[in-house]
Amino acid sequence: MTAFKKETEQFAAKGPAATSPQTLPAGIPGETVSVSGKYTVLPGFCDVHVHFREPGFSYKERIATGTAAAAAGGYTAVCTMPNLRPVPDSVGHLREETDIIGRDAVIPVYPFASITVGERGAELSDMRGIAEAFGPGSAAGCRGFVAGFSDDGVGVQSESLMREAMETAAKLGLPIVAHCEDESLRGKGYIHDGSYARAHGLPGISSESEWRQIERDLKLAAETGCKYHVCHISCRESVRLIREAKRRGVDVTCETAPHYLLLDCTVLRDEGRFRMNPPLREPADREALIDGVIDGTVDMIATDHAPHSEAEKAGGLAGSLFGIVGLETAFPALYTGLVKKGIITLEKLISLLTTAPRRRFGIPAGGFSVWDLGISREADPEKFLSMGRSTPFAGEVLFGECLMTSFGGKTVYRRSGAGAGAEAALAEAESAAAGRLPGQA
Ligand SMILES: [Zn+2]
């Protein structure tokens, strides 16, 4: 039995019964799901946390390859993180990114601008100018408007600066999207400060470095009325804090990633593909995140797709960069590990992957993908369209194969061997959607 199977199996008993594709209802609010013979048509997913590395790091990933990988994973919208060169902290710097998006993207890309200049945490970016030029209502916003502000990759250490950012974002009506990490608590670790780190004498990253900053930000969000979204939560304390804040009426949402729901530090190996930030934590954290998904505390699942070059991931746990790819394994991994195990329904997974993120970030619905959910195979990074190859799911047997993805009436991904049946299923979904969602591009 693989580690992945073992780690998800124990949840099988306590969740609802698995939904088979044949029992899928023929409609999800605002979207269309149809089942045509052996194929399942799913509404285009929306990933609010990807790193496409352009401008600045095109040896890791490009807008062209990142959006192609997204389409291959069933995604028809993504939000890109701003740890780029230049950092999109001004209208001119953001335009460098949107020019590449306009030229190369095969699906809509909604960039995040940075919260602070250069993501250095010392002064605010030109939030107002950026919102005027690239906000949802601006001329530039017609294809892919700026989705909000984030310093993803680092936490904003200064409380007063974060307060100022939230006050400004609240006036602009755009969300603050926070990578929460208190550097004073973080240390030099590169895996979770838990059982694996202790057993191997390795430096760990404490959960407190994550939840302390979430705790601070939740207080600021309540005071400022800012739309606040927490990136990639990974530990039980974060779930609890966000659950309590929601009960108090704070305007907060959060995401976690497939690997935090399906894996934990008991499956670690000394390979770069197990090094990401935040790190894989304890089984109890994974269980708390799943409980958070089930009770609605966790609003959405994002991949934190973070490609690096082969050399940058070849140094084992100690010597590799943080980050793994996720776009091409997200749905199969979640379908296999959560839906087929009966932990959540397919409808719930669709909500986590598309309806909820689109609603929170104001991203219009659009596009479809055609899946064969009956096929299982080993995840093979060599077949990825992403330039990144590093994933902890490599070699795991996953159910679900994306055959085609369509956006705006155009086929944006087609797997070789996708037959006429898949074409027909997609055409059926497109025409049904055209009737229900007039003006959808
Ligand atoms: Zn991050």
Image (cartoon, helix red, strand yellow):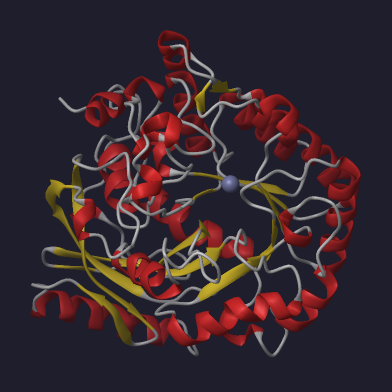
Left or right: where 163 falls relative to 262 = right
Q: Is residue 202 above or below residue 120?
A: above
- Quarter holding the N terminus is top left
- Quadrant of residue 85 in the image? bottom right
Examine the rendering and report whether any part of residue 441 can be seen.
Answer: no
Q: Is residue 158 above or below residue 364?
A: above
Examine the rendering and report whether any part of residue 343 can be seen.
Answer: yes
Q: Nearer the viewer, residue 424 or 287?
A: 287
Q: Which residue appears at 53% of the width and 38% of the height?
A: 277
- Quadrant of residue 157 in the image? top right
Q: Which residue appears at 51% of the width and 29% of the height?
A: 190
Whole-percent x and y of residue 319? 43, 35
Whole-percent x and y of residue 192? 51, 24
Left or right: where 386 falls relative to 28 = left
Whole-percent x and y of residue 106? 39, 80
Whole-percent x and y of residue 320? 43, 39
